[in-house]
Structures are given as C-alpha cells and as structure tokens.
Image (cartoon, grey):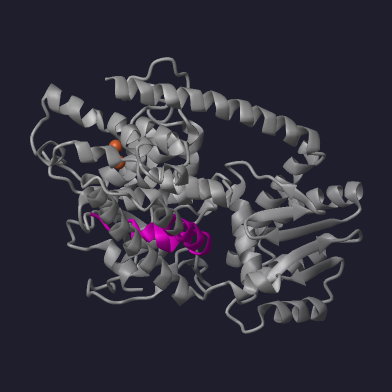
Amino acid sequence: MPEILNSIKLLQANNKLLNSTKEKDQKKINNNNSFDKILNKTIEEIFIRFSSALRTAQIYEPNNLAFIEQLSPLFTSIRNILANEGKAVFQFQENTLFFNKNRVKFDYISYHNFKFLADEFRKKEIGTVGFEPGLDDENLAQFIVLLANSKAEKENPFEDFQTNLENKEINHIFIVKTHPYEIATKMDDVQVKQSAKNVFFKSMTHMKESFNREKQHKKIHLKTSRRLIQSIVNIISQDESFMIGMTSIKNYDDYTVNHSTNVCVLAVSFGRRLGLNKEELINLGLSAFFHDIGKLEVPKEILDKKGKLTKEERKTIEKHTYHGVAKLINLKEFSYLPVNALYVALEHHLWANLSGYPKYWKRDKVNLYSKIVKMCDFFDSITTERPYRKHVLTKEAALGLMLAKSGTEFDPVLLKVFANMVGVYPIGSLVALNTGELGIVTETNPEVAFVLRPKVKLITDHNGNKIDGEIVDLTEKDPEAEEYKRTIVNSLDPNKYNIQPSDYFLAQ
Ligand SMILES: [Fe+2]
Ligand SMILES: [Fe+2]
C-alpha cells in the first residue's frame, strides 16, 4: 500500500520537525524562565493544601479537627514563602495563575486543585488574593471559613466579601476584584447549559454533514469544525460537568457521529485537566472529532456485524486507522488541522505498551494526543450499546476495566487523571441512595477524601415514585445527627431501570 507508507513517512518527517522545534522552544523557555522550580513546587503544594482546607471548611465547623489539621501545614507554607519573597500575591487570569507576576505551572495531578480554587474565587469575583507579612494562622483560618460560607449567587459577591473581611478585622490578606472583562463575558448558569446543548447538537449535525460530504468527495468545512470545537472548549471551561453529562447521549443518530462528538468532549475535558492551553485544546478536540473518519471506508455490514468477525473482517476494520490518515491528508482545508490529528487517526487503537494496532514499526512511544483520545474512545465505546456487544458496561464498570489495564493498554499516569475526571461514580451514572431515593450523578467531587460523595440529581423519592428532584450534595451533613444526609449504596444499570441519564441533562 504505497499510499499508507507515504502517510507514515510524512508522519515521521513531521515528527522529526516537531521534535527539533520543541527542543529549540524548550531551550528558549529554559533560558527565559527565571521562575524557580522549587518555588513553583511550593506554590503547587499551597494550592493543594488551600483547596483541601477550603473543601473541609465547606463541610465541617471551623473548630473541627479535620479543618485544623489541613490549616497548619498550609499556614507554614505561606509563612515560609512570605519570609523568602516578602509578599505572596496570587492572580487568576482565565486558566492561568500568576504568583508575584510570574506564571505558575501545575502538573497533571495538581491542576484540578488549582482549577477548583480558581473557580471558587471567580464565583466571588475575586481576581487577586495577596498575603502580607504579619499574617497569623487565626487570620488565615477566618479567611478560609469566610470564603467557604460566602454565597456566590449574591448580586455583588466581591463587595459583600470585602465588607465581611473588614468587619471581621481579618488583616494581612487583601483581595482585588476580577477584571471587568472576565465578569462581562461570564454567562449565567442557565445560559451556559443552553449553549452547551446547542453546541453539542450543532457539532453532531456538523459531523454528520462532514461525513456525508466526504462520501460525496465534497469539501469538509474544517473552518466550521474549528469554530465549533472552540465553542466546546469555552463551554467546558465554564461547566465541565454539564458538558460531560451530555456524553451520556448515546446512539442519538449514527453511532460514529454521536461517538465522535462524545470522544471530542471527553478529550477536551481531559486535556484541560492536563493543563493544555486553549489552542492545544482546540487541536486536541479536532483530532478527537475526526479520529474515526477512516471508518467511512469500512462497509457498514462489517461495522455493525452481530456475530464474531472473521479474520479478514477484523483486518478490514483495523485498516480504518490507515484510511483515516489518508483521508485527513487529502482534505482540501487540511491546513486547519493540526499534525496531531494524523497521529490520533493512526494511533488511537495503539496500546501504551505498543501492542494493539496498527503494528507500528520504528516507534518507541505513542503521541500524547493519541493516548488521550484512546482512553476517551475506549470509555465511550464500551459504555454504548452496539449490535455486536452483548453487555454494555455501566460507566464505573468501564472505569474498573480500564484501571485493570493500567500500564499495558493505558498510560498509568494519564489514567489516574482520567479516573479523577470521571470519578468513582462518573457523571451520568444512576445511583441508589441509603434513603431509598435514586439519583443521577451530575458532578464528581475531585477531593480524594470525598470521591464517594458526588452531587446527585434526585429522580425518584424514597418510595420509588419518579420526581423531578433537586440536585443534592452528598457531602451535606445533618447538623443534629452529625451524619451524612445521603450516601450511595450502589450504582445501577440505567438500561435495566429504563432510565436515560441523558434525559436529565437535556431537561436542564
Ligand atoms: Fe477507531
Ligand atoms: Fe472511536
């Protein structure tokens, strides 16, 4: 197959070019980057501790031992940094943190702590928090408790927070309001959910149209694809949980169309947690969107075959990876696609240990985008009903299966981040509570101590009657009994209960 060999040669040439550019860029960064790595690590630690303390304060009373235990190491870290730097000013800008005007980089694992704090501050319209010498642990504790208890829904959350800060005489901590531009562009909750639905369905329609056009050898409008993915990136930065919830929609139309949209959404959310910037997220989303374009060359009878595939049929399916690269290279608007889209089309069935397919000679590692898309692809596909699949896995069973393949099929570090994103009870799971109620998981809790306590939308009362219930936070405690109000007993297969979790996201 000369066409395929050419595709691979082109990929290898591009890879060399990319690597040499990357090396040059890295050297440039190393030279310019005077921001100390040890200091960066300390700030990461402060964020991990600050977010744990804040989450604990949202649940427990300030005199609770759990809160006090979180506070002490946090205070020590801030005090040390003040002693060395003289001041500690944290500024949040979109998805970036600046410490004393230097950009801070978070690694894969600690990024979600930064995101949590950035979101908490943004809700209160706080753009900058500064700590000054003289700060004591009492001031810090009061500040965190105030932050945990202040309601973001108020009309002037920043002004109210500042007044409280003054009233409580909390000293050596100052705050600055978020830049008016960021507040002006912030959509309210209902608008975000509405936009999420629009973008999701528009993307599916666009994907269907693109596939039809490709079949008729017409031009695919990649500029439109890029614009749509940009909107997906924007929505995910505002309401990731809701957008992930939309991926509970399965087989809405053609399987590949719905699946490709789901994989794109999951990949963008995943990439965001890995700290990719906006441009990289758009490129990742585009790569994910077209990962299965090669399936257009595989006869539908083989794709949907109920029984066992013959060796020949399996080979035909496996060739969709090669066909994908060839198709993408030949697209008229190819320049709107990142080179990574070619890797993803070729490698999204390749295992982390290089088994899987295609058999990929002369290669010792898999492209990062391919690894990301592989995980999202696997997760979405095994949780979707297909003619050839006897058992559709529930989301948590799928995650369990993936964890069992850590280090072989999946990259262990990335899998940890993925597991953290979908949670022990992934968004869209149906769960039974100890109160007898049933609910759908709408938001996971990223704090390790509370992974079993996500937010849940109640869909039946304790007698099993269907209701359009409220969204409850399972970390909520009954103040008198000092016990959790609700706890998950087990998760259920929505198909057996004739429940479509996606309905609950569409009804929002
Ligand atoms: Fe595929
Ligand atoms: Fe796929």
- Which region is colored magenta? 228-250
Q: Is residue 434 left or right of residue 500?
A: right
* Residue 239 painted magenta: yes
At 54% from the left edge and 46% from the top edge, which residue is drawn? 280
Q: Position of residue 106 (x, y in %)?
A: 65, 45
Q: Nearer the viewer, residue 47 or 119?
A: 119
User: Which image quarter has ligand 1?
Assistant: top left
* Residue 418 painted magenta: no
Q: Nearer the viewer, residue 37 or 73?
A: 37
User: Which quadrant of the structure image shows residue 67?
Assistant: bottom right
At 33% from the left edge and 56% from the top edge, which residue is drawn? 247
At 70% from the left edge and 46% from the top edge, which residue is drawn? 45
Asked whether residue 332 is in view, the answer is yes
- Magenta span: predominant SS is helix
At 39% from the left edge and 49% from the top edge, which residue is drawn? 264
Picture quarter with the C terminus: bottom left
Q: Position of residue 119 (x, y in %)?
A: 60, 63
Q: Is residue 113 left or right of residue 436?
A: right
Q: Is residue 236 above or below residue 424?
A: below
Q: Is residue 325 above or below residue 4?
A: below
Asked whether residue 393 is in view, the answer is no
